[in-house]
Amino acid sequence: MTWSEMQPLLEQGTIDTLYMVLWSTVVTVLGGLPLGILLVLTDKGGLLQNRPLNKVVGVIVNIGRSLPFIILLIALIPFTTLVVGTFIGPTAMIVPLAVGAIPFFARLVETAVREVDHGLVEAVQSMGGSIPTIIRKVLLPQALPSLVSGVTTTVIVLIGYSAMAGAVGGEGLGSKAITYGYQRFDTQFMLITVVVLIAIVTVVQLIGDLAVRLLARRGRTA
Amino acid sequence: MITTTGLTKVYESRGRQVTALDGVDLHVREGEVFGVIGQSGAGKSSLIRCVNLLERPTSGTVTVDGVDLTALAGRGRRAGKDLRRARSSIGMVFQHFNLLSSRTVEDNIELPLEILGVSGAERSRRALELLDLVGLADKAKAYPGQLSGGQKQRVGIARALAGNPKVLLSDEATSALDPETTRSILQLLRDLNRQLGLTVLLITHEMDVVKTICDSAALMRKGRIVESGTVSELLATPGSELAAELFPVTGDATGPDRTVVDVTFHGEAATQPVISQLSRTYNVDISILGAAMDTVGGRQIGRMRIELPGRYEENVVPVGFLREQGLQVEIVEADATVPAQAAQSPVLAKEGAK
């Protein structure tokens, strides 16, 4: 393949990858954040202590995390078709990507929120703060640097998953690498897609780290 | 202002029961600074956290400003609306300040006002006013991480006062601070107590804190209140441990044939120069072996250990004179450091500890 042949493929692949990753990240955060907070609040000694609920949610999250993504991808085909109307294409891929990443992100949220000093929660309780107030004004703002760092990690995992999704009818760089690089034995094209993926991951990590540094700097030192 | 009756708190951990509070009856009057002192594990922390129900008492009641908080709390773990409203009129300051590192000083002080639903402009006005009150007007935009310990606690105090509380709870507020900063924070609490008529309940393990600002004090041990009363009531109580700790006197007789007497000053007699009167009236030489005097609540109170020449039998008349002056007198036995309980009128003011 010449460069002029590769260029449109790479461009389309990158756009599709970014599209899938962006929207699945949005869905993952919307789904994983409440789940992670729920895991902390319902745990022993939590504000909404509820051991049975905590166990059930914990087990579901663990199952979600242990399933290999490729299996999940196929197993979810009926569900994806139900939600999106098709199981092929970048939009359809958002469903399995989010379902796969929500349990992972929920555990990261759980860890981040658990690290918030309990004294701060008590201080707000002593002011008459309700549980929603505590979540909104204490847990989330205080855990923000760790949460942002968790989102970064999740985005990178989703980039990896999205490449895998290429094998099951998704679009994106992964799909292009499989179709043109692997199946047509075009090693050069394969290498270039890998380099583009590495570049995307690096940029995401850099932005994430920068955001964490800026957020963390507020509180700590002058 | 704050009354607890039969307050009990039992913690359960791995099947074992630990009694942190064992029937505590506490009464804090309006406008006073009340100190609860005790060693760690005595239950002070559980006590103060039960007052605003951060900790649910196992049994007993807590009444603050006429409102029975234990009745408001209900049975669930979650704090209902009524309890939350009641809490917002009880300020609390903490040993480790508990400021939100993600918010500026001003925003930290505004937090309780946000919870109360105060509008933005009003919140900001009130926060700056409070910062001025605690002497940190220039730190509004700083983050807690940029402040010293003492400054952080000032912010903590300003935040606790934001909702115009009548009661301030202080949970070891000075225990993480150096002695000089401790003094300045205590001074601030004292000023606020006077200026705003704020009732302060504080817990501490430092006797100096009680000495510096408390009108009343209670001694806690193993979940019970062992002694309690105003500082002069405690001083008037023979054998009071708190009085002995607050006003320690030491010193041994300089030789045989001496009478050592502990004299406690409280009330009116403290204004009279009794020692020199005694000396002049009976023509005796008096040595002062040790003294711990203080001005508490504008009155001089304290204890003094003096030595009179001759055995006790020879000094019955001078000792009688001291008693006539309204002073409390205890004869210290030559070999014993424990003061002998000579005939006294035991005006006990023991509350609590059933």
Image (spheres, helix red, strand yellow):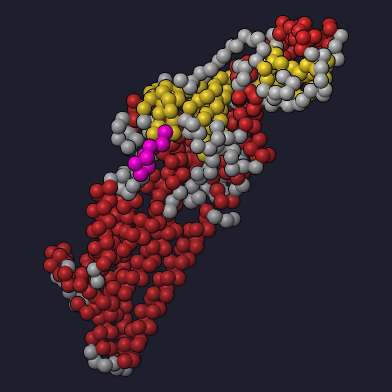
Identity of the residue drawn at 67% across and 12% down: B342
Residue A99 against residue A5 in the figure, above or below = above
Q: Image quadrant for the C terminus of chain A? A: bottom right
Q: Is residue B12 magenta?
A: yes
Whether residue A61 can be seen here: yes
Percent position (x, y) of residue A87?
16, 71
What residue range appears in magenta?
Answer: B11-19
Q: Nearer the viewer, residue A191 or B171?
A: B171
Relative to A111, does residue B259 appear above or below in the rendering? above
Tell me where residue A188 sits by quadrant. bottom left
The reply to whether residue B170 is visible in this rendering is no
Q: Residue at x 29, y 80 (%)?
A: A173
In the rendered image, residue B234, in percent from the top left (x then y), is placed at 60, 19
Q: Is residue A75 left or right of residue A30?
A: left
Displayed quadrant of residue B257: top right
* Residue at x 37%, y 47% (from the top left corner): A135
- Left or right: B71, with B95 as reference point: left
Whether residue B312 is situated above or below residue A167 in the rendered picture: above
Left/right placement of residue A209 relative to residue B206 reads: left
Q: Is residue B127 above or below residue B296?
A: below
